[in-house]
C-alpha cells in the first residue's frame, strides 16, 4: 500500500464526503446546488472509486461505482487524483463532455468552497458561521479518515487491531454536530450523527473547544483534565483512535 | 454526604500543562479517571490508608500509589529506618553494606532465587531480565502476553504507539493469556529463536477483568521453557509481596529463572530487584547495567524494614482478609441496589467492574461518585489494599459506596 494510494482514499472517502454537509449546512452552497441533477463518477486506475450524486436538493457521496453516471472522470493513478485534489492536475473525462463547462465553473466553485472551509485562517474562525462549518467538516473528515487509515495505513492498522467491537461517538455539546465510528470485527464504518449505546464517547464542551481540539490547538490532556473534553466508556478505543488520527498529517496537510 | 470540589488541583494542573508535558504523565495521568473533574490530581499528605489532596479533601486510598504502599503511608518503622540511613548518608561513592544485607534477606525469602540485583523502577529490571535471557540463549525473540504490562521501554510497548521503531517490536511475540497451546505453536514456528517467556503471575490487563492462571498453565509453560531452552521470567512487580512473601511463583507453584520485583518491596522508597537462579548469575554478570541512583542506601534500609514488617504481620494474609471484607461489602451493597459488581484477581489487588454495562460508563460513574465522597476508586485499573487499611476505613468506604450506588441508580433510572 503506497502513500499515494492511501492519500487518494483519504481524498475521495474522507475529504470529498464533506460535500454532503457543505451543501446541507452552508446556505450559500445549499442554494447554489439546490437544482443540480447530476452524477459524477471518480475512477482511479488501481485505486479507489467514488461517486457524487446531486439530486432533489441533496448531495450524496458514496464509495464504488454508479451504473450510469452523467460524468465519468478517470485518473491514471492515485497520484494523479491527489494532484487534482491539490489543485495541480486535471482529470481525464471519459463521459459527459457536454458537462465540462459545469465542472470547470460550477463544480469548481463548490470544491473551492469546501477548501475554504477546510483550510481555516484565524480571522475566519472568529466568525461564528465559519467556525461552525469548519468544526463540522473537520470532525467529519476525522471520522471518515479513521476508517481509511485503520484499514490501510500500516501503523494505524496496528492500532485498529486493538479496538474492540462497538461504536465510538464524538459529539459537540450541547446539540451536536456528532459523528460516530462503528468497529466490528475488523470493519470500520463511519457515519454522521449520534448512535445508540456507544461503547465510548468523546464530548466536546462547545464549538470553540471542539474546533481548537480537533485542529490540535488545545492541549488534549489539559482539555480532558479540565472537563472541556469529556471522555467515557471504553476509552482505550479512543486512545487507539487517537493513534490512527495522528497518521493523518502523514498524508494530508 | 458532602461531595468534594477540586479548585486547587485544577489550578495546579493548568499551571502544570504550561511547563510539563501532559501536565501529569504516565500512569498518574488524569485521562483514565472518568470524569477527570471528579478526581483530585495533587496530593498534599498521606497517613496510613488515607491521603489528603491539595484542596484538603480526605480519601481512603485504594490505589496505594499504584502499588508501592503495602504497609500504608508514613509507616513509622520503615520511615525511621529510612531516616536513620539518610542521617548516615544515602548516595555514596561506594556501595552500602545494606546492599549485601538486602540481597541476603531476599535470597532467604524468595523461593528458588539465589541472587539479587538492585535498580530503581520495575522497567529497569524487566528490561535487564530480557537482556540477560537474550544473552544467555543467543536468541532474539521474546514471548509476552497480549495486554500484559512490563514497563515503558520500546520493546514493552504495543506496536503503533509513538516513539517506536518497527525493529523495537519485530522480535516480540504476543500470545493470549492462559493459552499454553499458543506458546507451543510459537515455539514450533520459531525453533531455537525464543529467548524468554515473560508474564505476570496472573493477568492484570487495564479496563478488563483480572484472570487467574488456569489449572496447570504455569506448569505447562515451565515445562515448555525447560524443554526448549527458554528463560522463564516472572514479572512480579505488581503482585510481589501481596500474594506470597516467597514470591508469587511460589504461590502459583512454578519455578522461574528470573523474577522481577519493585512496587511493594520498600513501601514507597525507590528500589527494584531482579532475582535469579544460580545458573543465571554468570549471564547477568557479564551485562553492563547500572544507574546513577541504583546504589542509594536509604531505599535499601526501607526495603529491609518493609520485608521484616511484612513477615511480622503476615502481610499477604492480612491484605487477603482486608480485601475480602472490602469486596464482600461492596458486592452486597451493589446487590442491594440491583447491580452486579464483579470482582476478579486476588483480594489484595482486586479489579472491580459493574457488569450491567459493557461500556463501563455506569462503573465509571460509580467510581467517580465514590471518589468525590472520599473513597478513591479508579475505574480502569486493579486496586491495591495495604496492611494499613482498618475496619474503620472499610466501614467508611462501604457507606460511601452505598450512597454512590443510590446516585447512579437514580441516574440510570434503576429505581
Image: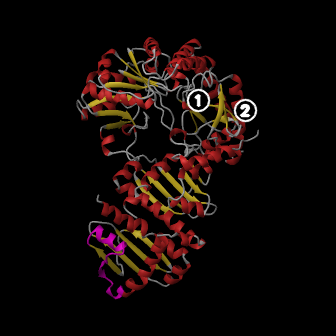
At 69% across and 31% down in the image, what residue appears? B397
Looking at the rendering, the stretch of residues picked out in magenta corresponds to A76-100
Question: Within the image, what quadrant is residue B34 found in?
Answer: top right
Q: Position of residue A104 (x, y in %)?
A: 38, 84
Report the residue marked by disc 1: B64
Secondary structure under the numbered disc 1 in the rendered image = helix
Q: Quadrant of residue B405?
A: top right
Quadrant containing the C terminus of chain B is top right
Label 2 sits on a secondary structure element that is helix
Q: Quadrant of the N terminus of chain B?
A: top right
From the image, state whether disc 2 or disc 1 is nearer to you: 1
- Mark 2 and mark 1 residues within 8 Å of each other at the beta carbon: no
B78 in the magenta segment: no
Q: Position of residue B152 (x, y in %)?
A: 43, 37
Q: Which mark is residue B399?
A: 2
Residue B128 x/y as whole percent? 36, 28
Distance between mark 2 and mark 1 Cα atoms: 20 Å
Label 2 and label 1 in one chain: yes
Q: Is residue A133 or residue B48 the one in the foreground?
A: B48
Q: Nearer the viewer, residue B131 or B285?
A: B285
- Name the subunit of mark 2: B
For image coordinates 42% across by 58% down, the residue present is A147
Amino acid at each position: 500500500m503506497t502513500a499515494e494510494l492511501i492519500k487518494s482514499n483519504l481524498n475521495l472517502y474522507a475529504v470529498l464526503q464533506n460535500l454532503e454537509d457543505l451543501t446541507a449546512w452552508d446556505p450559500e452552497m445549499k442554494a447554489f446546488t439546490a437544482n443540480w441533477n447530476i452524477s459524477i463518477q471518480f475512477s482511479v486506475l488501481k485505486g479507489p472509486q467514488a461517486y457524487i450524486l446531486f439530486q432533489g436538493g441533496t448531495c450524496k457521496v458514496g464509495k464504488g461505482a454508479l451504473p450510469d453516471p452523467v460524468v465519468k472522470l478517470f485518473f491514471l493513478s492515485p497520484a494523479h487524483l491527489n494532484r487534482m485534489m491539490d489543485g495541480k492536475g486535471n482529470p481525464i473525462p471519459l463521459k459527459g463532455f457536454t458537462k465540462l463547462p459545469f465542472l470547470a465553473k460550477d463544480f469548481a466553485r463548490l470544491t473551492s468552497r469546501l477548501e475554504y472551509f477546510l483550510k481555516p485562517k484565524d480571522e475566519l474562525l472568529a466568525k461564528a458561521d465559519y467556525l461552525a462549518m469548519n468544526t463540522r467538516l473537520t470532525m467529519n473528515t476525522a471520522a471518515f479518515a479513521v476508517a481509511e487509515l485503520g484499514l490501510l495505513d500500516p501503523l494505524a492498522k496496528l492500532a485498529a487491531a486493538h479496538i474492540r467491537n462497538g461504536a465510538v461517538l464524538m459529539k459537540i455539546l450541547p446539540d451536536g454536530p456528532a459523528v460516530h465510528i462503528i468497529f466490528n470485527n475488523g470493519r470500520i464504518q463511519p457515519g454522521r450523527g449520534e448512535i445508540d449505546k456507544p461503547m465510548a464517547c468523546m464530548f466536546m464542551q462547545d464549538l470553540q473547544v471542539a474546533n481548537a481540539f480537533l485542529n490540535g490547538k488545545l492541549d488534549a490532556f489539559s482539555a480532558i483534565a479540565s472537563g472541556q473534553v469529556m471522555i467515557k466508556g471504553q476509552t482505550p478505543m479512543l486512545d487507539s483512535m487517537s493513534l490512527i488520527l495522528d497518521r493523518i498529517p502523514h498524508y494530508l496537510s | 454526604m458532602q461531595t468534594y470540589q477540586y479548585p486547587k488541583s485544577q489550578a495546579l494542573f493548568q499551571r502544570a500543562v504550561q511547563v510539563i508535558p501532559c501536565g501529569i504523565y504516565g500512569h498518574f495521568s488524569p485521562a483514565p479517571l472518568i470524569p477527570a473533574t471528579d478526581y483530585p490530581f495533587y496530593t498534599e499528605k498521606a497517613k496510613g490508608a488515607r491521603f489528603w489532596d491539595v484542596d484538603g479533601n480526605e480519601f481512603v486510598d485504594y490505589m496505594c500509589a499504584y502499588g508501592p504502599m503495602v504497609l500504608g503511608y508514613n509507616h513509622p518503622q520503615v520511615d525511621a529506618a529510612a531516616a536513620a540511613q539518610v542521617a548516615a548518608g544515602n548516595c555514596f561513592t561506594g556501595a552500602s553494606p545494606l546492599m549485601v544485607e538486602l540481597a541476603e534477606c531476599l535470597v532467604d525469602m524468595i523461593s528458588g532465587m539465589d541472587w539479587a540485583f538492585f535498580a530503581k523502577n520495575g522497567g529497569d529490571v524487566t528490561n535487564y531480565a530480557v537482556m540477560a535471557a537474550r544473552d544467555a540463549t543467543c536468541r532474539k525473540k521474546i514471548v509476552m502476553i497480549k495486554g500484559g504490562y512490563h514497563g515503558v521501554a520500546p520493546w514493552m510497548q504495543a506496536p503503533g504507539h509513538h516513539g517506536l521503531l518497527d525493529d523495537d517490536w519485530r522480535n516480540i511475540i504476543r500470545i493470549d493469556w492462559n493459552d499454553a497451546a499458543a506458546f507451543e505453536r510459537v515455539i514450533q514456528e520459531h525453533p531455537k529463536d525464543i529467548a524468554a517467556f515473560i508474564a505476570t503471575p496472573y493477568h492484570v490487563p487495564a479496563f478488563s477483568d483480572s484472570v487467574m492462571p488456569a489449572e496447570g498453565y504455569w506448569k505447562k509453560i515451565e515445562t515448555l521453557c525447560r524443554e526448549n531452552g527458554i528463560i522463564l521470567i516472572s514479572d512480579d512487580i505488581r503482585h510481589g509481596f501481596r500474594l506470597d512473601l516467597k514470591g508469587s511463583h511460589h504461590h502459583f507453584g512454578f519455578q522461574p529463572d528470573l523474577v522481577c520485583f519493585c512496587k511493594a518491596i520498600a513501601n514507597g522508597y525507590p528500589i527494584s530487584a531482579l532475582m535469579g537462579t544460580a545458573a543465571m548469575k554468570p549471564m547477568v554478570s557479564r551485562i553492563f547495567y547500572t544507574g546513577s541512583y541504583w546504589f542509594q542506601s536509604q531505599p535499601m534500609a526501607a526495603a529491609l524494614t518493609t520485608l521484616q514488617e511484612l513477615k511480622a504481620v503476615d502481610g499477604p494474609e492480612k491484605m487477603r482478609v482486608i480485601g475480602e471484607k472490602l469486596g464482600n461489602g461492596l458486592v452486597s451493597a451493589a446487590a442491594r441496589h440491583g447491580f452486579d459488581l464483579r470482582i476478579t484477581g486476588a483480594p489484595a489487588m482486586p479489579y472491580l467492574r459493574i457488569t450491567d454495562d459493557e461500556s463501563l460508563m455506569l462503573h465509571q460513574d460509580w467510581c467517580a461518585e465514590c471518589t468525590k465522597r472520599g473513597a478513591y476508586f479508579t475505574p480502569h485499573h486493579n486496586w491495591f489494599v495495604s496492611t494499613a487499611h482498618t475496619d474503620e476505613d472499610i466501614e467508611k468506604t462501604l457507606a460511601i459506596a452505598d450512597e454512590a450506588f443510590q446516585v447512579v441508580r437514580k441516574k440510570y433510572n434503576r429505581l
